[in-house]
Image (tube, rainbow, N blue to C red):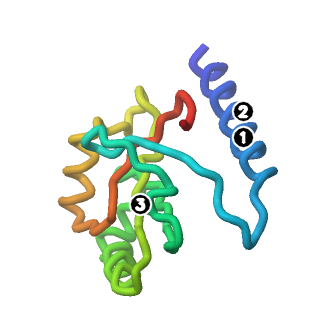
């Protein structure tokens, strides 16, 4: 049953991305989205209109994420691009209920303890983007 649930969620995610990609063209504005940050505040992509925005999907338990945060690669990129006026948004990439999921306050602590210097730390709403 768990496998079927994961397979269905995976297919829904692929379908959602496919639909979103169908409307995206190089040179055009990115589609609008809104997510809640770790404090519950809504953050919209349009809040940063006219700026370059980096979306970092992240999971502090991912071995690749750990590698790059321990080596300070991500923090260096965040700081370097912040100096250039780039907005950096970290997005939790782990679904609620997954063993790697962090509640918002815990995710915030993980990112801050790692030295992340993002403009916002967002929680992905797997039930559907608004």
Q: Residue at x 38, y 39 (%)?
A: 100
Q: Position of residue 89 (x, y in %)?
A: 41, 60
Q: Nearer the viewer, mark 2 or mark 3?
A: 3
Figure check: 120 above or below 74: above
Helix, strand or loop status at disc 3? strand
Helix, strand or loop status at disc 1? helix
**Mark 1 in CB contact with mark 3 (< 8 angstroms):** no
State the CA–CA distance, disc 1 to disc 3. Answer: 22 Å
Q: Nearer the viewer, residue 84 or 3?
A: 84
State the CA–CA distance, disc 2 to disc 3. Answer: 25 Å
Figure check: 87 above or below 56: below
State the residue position of label 1: 14
Helix, strand or loop status at disc 2? helix
State the CA–CA distance, disc 1 to disc 2. Answer: 5 Å
Q: Is residue 40 left or right of residue 89?
A: left
Q: Residue at x 28, y 46 (%)?
A: 107
* Residue placed furthest toward the top: 1
**Mark 2 in CB contact with mark 3 (< 8 angstroms):** no
Q: Position of residue 111 (x, y in %)?
A: 27, 57
**Mark 1 in CB contact with mark 2 (< 8 angstroms):** yes
Q: Which mark is residue 11?
A: 2
Q: Residues within 10 Å of mark 1 (few under 14, many from 20)?
A: few
Q: Nearer the viewer, residue 14 or 40?
A: 40
Q: Position of residue 42 (x, y in %)?
A: 38, 43
Q: Nearer the viewer, mark 1 or mark 3?
A: 3
State the residue position of label 3: 89
Q: Is residue 102 left or right of residue 11?
A: left
Q: Position of residue 88 (x, y in %)?
A: 41, 67
Corner quadrant of residue 112: bottom left
Q: Residue at x 43, y 51 (%)?
A: 91
């Amino acid at each position: 049953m768990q496998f079927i649930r994961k397979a269905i969620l995976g297919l829904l995610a692929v379908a959602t991305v496919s639909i979103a990609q169908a409307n995206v063209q190089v040179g055009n504005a990115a589609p609008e989205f809104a997510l809640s940050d770790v404090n519950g505040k809504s953050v919209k992509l349009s809040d940063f209109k006219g700026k370059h925005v980096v979306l970092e999907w992240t999971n502090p338990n991912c071995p690749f994420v750990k590698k790059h945060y321990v080596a300070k690669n991500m923090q260096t990129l965040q700081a370097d691009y912040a100096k250039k006026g780039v907005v950096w948004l970290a997005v939790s990439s782990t679904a609620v209920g997954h063993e790697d999921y962090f509640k918002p306050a815990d995710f915030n602590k993980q990112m801050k303890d790692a030295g992340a210097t993002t403009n916002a730390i967002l929680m992905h709403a797997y039930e559907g983007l608004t």
